[in-house]
């Protein structure tokens, strides 16, 4: 296929799957860039436009209540992190401290030039994240509890440095409407929580209010881009406008900001959340971001001129979204499967619990949208305080709030604190990862079979969003082919659709879930996966590939395991492995069998293991992106990629038998 024909084919597929409205909006955005329209709409301001200070819009927590929740250990952790920020270090994406750098490369260009002509700035997320001012929530929390003046002093110093080196609409920090929206929300928070500080002089407060107005003015001209994306961009930008209107009610543009913000917030919640609670970005972290945005909007509603409540359609979708995500929370750790794209976003880090603990947001969201707690009282309640939610708990309520979770999730719960999530979805919006029939398996608070996460969206090969591939997910691949067509760094086409075909419980109580997807139907081949949670605590995963028995196929099974000490016993037809987890022994036995003339015969397997891109067992092959997991953005840690290759005719069956033995066994 020629280059022109290929591009035309990709364009037609994108039109069919993404839809004309989305592509048309994106085309109009590109037209606005290339015609200079957006440059004319966002000129460098010539004079201040805001003469009023920012109005408080949040109900701040009671110090005594917050102190009790955090405890001595939590307060120490909070103040230590705040002091890191004062010293010029920040924990981006919930990771380790790095220098807090708010100065972009020179010379600065108008933001439209970076979009129109490209840039050599590398991964923009590494520039944007510190400039979101998300770290101000840590400084604010610490100041509220300690009244340590070094915290507001540091904020004002960083703000002035940012305003000096990032003048309105010049430089990479003005490219994205989403980034400006999240930054202005951080400004609004800081203005209120530091209002009593001697460092919050009237001149500084006026400069901050002017900054909020300039940020808000940046959003409407390119809201069409956020509408084209119809994802977290639209939610964030609408939330920024709504927040600016609440904090600057007398600004001439405030009525327009509030109208736009409220309209597109509700549109996004109603259209991005499916009736069953699934979020359109197919990502647990973006799902959490969406719920955080809804909580902030609800918290500041009393400060808006209209004080509109969420309409019933929006509330219903938010309730479903809370239930969907609650079904994926591990009750011991608060962790969830690292499903889909994970850009490390935590837009309201109003908690001392780690980035990967989803209980703070889900506790608050359950209270806000269901009217009841999701978990027993705990340190995860702090976000609820910041969003003005009463700390009430239903009596005799179990963790994970079984009464709130979605009943139709592809989740199975087994014995001895084990559970599994089978990824089987029918896409109606573009997928971020090719992960159909991926399996997450958890035991006693540990994620035993890992989703690889994301690591980096933009990086030199091979790390340009490489972990979205099915080759690194816990599933089957066929003949080295992707089930879907990867048409760009963030674009999959020819969506592989999956469904759960059966969910059963047998006479002895074993639970089974059977799913399949159509990603290999172009070869006439179907992949079916049956997951069984046995009453004795073991788990059985049976992969079956069926299709024409005319030639051999290369079938590949991949499991991603934490970087535990391991032992292996290999033969041509059975592979027994043992992993020494912190909670006890994890055993895995894998064998393959093919059907020939009505008989089932063992199939020869080639077994290998890759750690951090290096082959450590077996004949290979390996790849630099295999054997890694990324818990958050820009962070990857070694893991064990357990790989079984079988060259066989079909039908073929590969069975993985998991057995957990805790330290008491």
Image: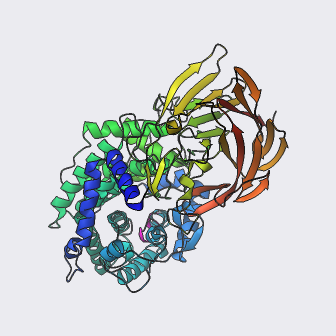
Depth check, front residue: 45 or 454:
454
Q: Write the start and end of the magenta stretch as one range.
A: 131-137
Depth check, front residue: 595 or 113:
595
Q: Is residue 133 magenta?
A: yes
Image-quadrant location for residue 172: bottom left
Q: Is residue 456 above or below residue 159?
A: above
Q: Is residue 215 magenta?
A: no
Quarter in which the N terminus is drawn: bottom left
Quarter in which the C terminus is drawn: top right
Depth check, front residue: 577 or 63:
577
Image-quadrant location for residue 636: bottom right
Residue 264, percent from left and from top? 25, 51
Q: Residue at x 66, y 55 (%)?
A: 626
Q: In this view, does 244 lie to the left or right of 515?
A: left
Depth check, front residue: 45 or 338:
338
Q: Is residue 48 above or below residue 74?
A: below
């Amino acid at each position: 296929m020629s280059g022109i024909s290929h591009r035309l084919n990709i364009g037609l597929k994108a039109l069919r799957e993404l839809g004309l409205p989305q592509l048309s909006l994106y085309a109009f955005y590109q037209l606005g860039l290339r015609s200079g329209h957006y440059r004319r709409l966002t000129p460098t301001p010539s004079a201040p436009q805001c003469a009023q200070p920012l109005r408080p819009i949040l109900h701040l927590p009671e110090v005594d209540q917050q102190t009790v929740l955090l405890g001595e250990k939590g307060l120490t952790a909070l103040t230590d992190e705040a002091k890191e920020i004062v010293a010029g270090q920040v924990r981006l994406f919930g990771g380790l401290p790095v220098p807090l750098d708010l100065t972009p490369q020179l010379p600065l260009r108008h933001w439209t030039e970076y979009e129109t002509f490209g840039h050599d700035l590398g991964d923009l997320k590494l520039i944007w994240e510190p400039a979101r001012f998300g770290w101000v929530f840590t400084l604010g929390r610490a100041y509220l509890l300690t009244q340590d003046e070094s915290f507001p002093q540091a904020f004002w110093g960083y703000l002035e440095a940012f305003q000096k080196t990032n003048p309105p609409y010049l430089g990479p920090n003005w490219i994205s409407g989403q980034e400006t929206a999240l930054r202005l929300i951080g400004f609004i928070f800081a203005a209120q929580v530091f209002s009593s500080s001697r460092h919050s002089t009237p001149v500084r407060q006026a400069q901050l209010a002017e900054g909020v107005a300039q940020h808000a003015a940046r959003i409407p001209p390119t809201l069409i881009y956020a509408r084209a994306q119809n994802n977290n961009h639209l939610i964030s930008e609408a939330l920024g406008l709504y927040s600016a209107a609440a904090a600057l009610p007398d600004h001439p543009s405030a009525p327009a900001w509030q109208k736009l913000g409220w309209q597109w917030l509700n549109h996004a919640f109603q259209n991005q959340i499916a009736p069953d609670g699934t979020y359109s970005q197919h990502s647990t972290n973006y799902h959490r971001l969406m719920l955080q945005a809804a909580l902030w909007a609800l918290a500041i509603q009393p400060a808006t001129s209209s004080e509109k409540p969420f309409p019933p359609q929006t509330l219903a979708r938010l309730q479903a979204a809370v239930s969907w995500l609650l079904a994926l929370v591990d009750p011991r750790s608060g962790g969830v499967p690292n499903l889909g794209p994970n850009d490390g976003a935590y837009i309201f880090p109003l908690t001392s619990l780690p980035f990967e603990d989803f209980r703070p947001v889900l506790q608050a969201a359950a209270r806000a949208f269901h009217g009841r707690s999701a978990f027993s009282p705990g340190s995860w309640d702090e976000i609820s305080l910041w969003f003005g939610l009463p700390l009430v708990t239903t009596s005799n309520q179990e963790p994970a709030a079984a009464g709130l979770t979605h009943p139709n999730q592809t989740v199975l719960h087994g014995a001895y604190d084990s559970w599994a999530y089978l990824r089987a979805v029918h896409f109606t919006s573009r997928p971020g990862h090719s992960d159909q029939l991926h399996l997450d398996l958890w035991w006693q608070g540990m994620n035993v079979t890992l989703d690889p996460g994301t690591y980096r969206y933009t990086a030199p090969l091979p790390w340009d969003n490489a972990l979205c591939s099915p080759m690194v997910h816990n599933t089957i691949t066929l003949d080295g082919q992707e089930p879907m067509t990867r048409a760009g760094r963030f674009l999959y086409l020819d969506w592989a659709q999956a469904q759960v075909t059966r969910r059963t419980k047998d006479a002895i109580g074993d639970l089974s879930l059977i799913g399949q997807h159509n990603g290999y139907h172009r070869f006439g081949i179907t992949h079916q996966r049956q997951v069984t949670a046995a009453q004795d605590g073991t788990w059985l995963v049976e992969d079956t590939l069926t299709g024409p028995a005319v030639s051999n196929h290369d079938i590949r099974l991949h499991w991603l395991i934490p970087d535990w000490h391991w032992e292996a016993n290999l033969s041509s037809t059975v592979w027994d492995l043992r992993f020494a987890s912190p909670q006890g022994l994890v055993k895995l036995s894998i064998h393959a069998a093919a059907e020939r003339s009505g008989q089932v015969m063992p199939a020869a397997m080639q077994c290998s293991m890759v750690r951090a891109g290096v082959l450590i067992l077996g004949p290979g092959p390996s790849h630099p992106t295999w054997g890694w997991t990324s818990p958050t953005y820009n962070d990857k840690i070694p893991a064990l990629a357990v790989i079984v290759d079988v060259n066989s005719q079909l039908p073929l069956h590969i069975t993985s038998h998991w057995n957990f033995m805790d330290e008491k066994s």
